[in-house]
Amino acid sequence: MIEQTELIVVEWNYTPPVNSLDTLDIISDLTRFDVMKKRAASKKGIACRLSCLFLHGEMPVLNYVAEHSYVIDLDDAIDKNELLRMIRNSFSNFNEKFEFRKLGTILEKKNLSPLDESNIDLDAILPLLI
């Protein structure tokens, strides 16, 4: 059985630009996905950390970081498809929190860039779940 903990926002540092912006096109963002192995006597799992940095030129506008975990029974095997489903679910939860918290900021009309799954090395993450 796979259990997912609640996504917790660990950092939300918002600094509005000093000068007003005519367009959000000059705001860039970079999203990262990091994974760490978790292990207990009767469970295995991974801790997931998603972060997104929004920049106006070189000045940070928002640094958003959230974490959660997947806890899995020791005898459960996870394949690439299941792992990818977990990662997509993590990003979906991350995006959902962003959509709610961005209201009232300069980023109100900005969306997170989609997670680039081609940059995720599933073969490197799967051994963490053995």
Image (spheres, grey):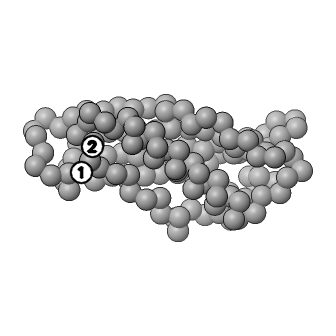
Give, as a three-letter code, the residue at label 1: Ile
- Which labelled disc corresponds to residue 72? none
Tell me the residue at 41%/46% (across/down). 52
For the C terminus, the quadrant is bottom right
Tell me the residue at 57%/56% (across/down). 88
Residue 97: x %, y % from top left: 45, 39
- Residue beneath disc 2: 107
Could you tell me if residue 58 is visible in this image?
A: no
Q: Work out whether mark 1 precedes mark 2 in sequence or the reverse, and give the earlier one.
A: 1
Real-space CA distance between mark 1 and mark 2, rounded to the nearest whole angstrom = 9 Å
Residue 65: x %, y % from top left: 46, 38
Q: Secondary structure at mark 2?
A: loop
| Residues at circles 1 and 2 in contact by the CB criterion of under 8 Å | yes
Tell me the residue at 50%/38% (across/down). 66
Name the outermost residue toward the bottom.
118
- Residue beneath disc 1: 27
Give, as a three-letter code, the residue at label 2: Leu
Q: Between tags 1 and 2, which lies in front?
A: 2
Q: Is residue 103 left or right of residue 45?
A: left
The relative height of residue 126 versus residue 38 in the rendered view (above or below) is below
Residue 41: x %, y % from top left: 87, 35
The relative height of residue 88 versus residue 74 in the rendered view (above or below) is below
Q: Relative to the observer, which residue lies in front, 37 or 15?
A: 15
The relative height of residue 48 versus residue 87 in the rendered view (above or below) is above
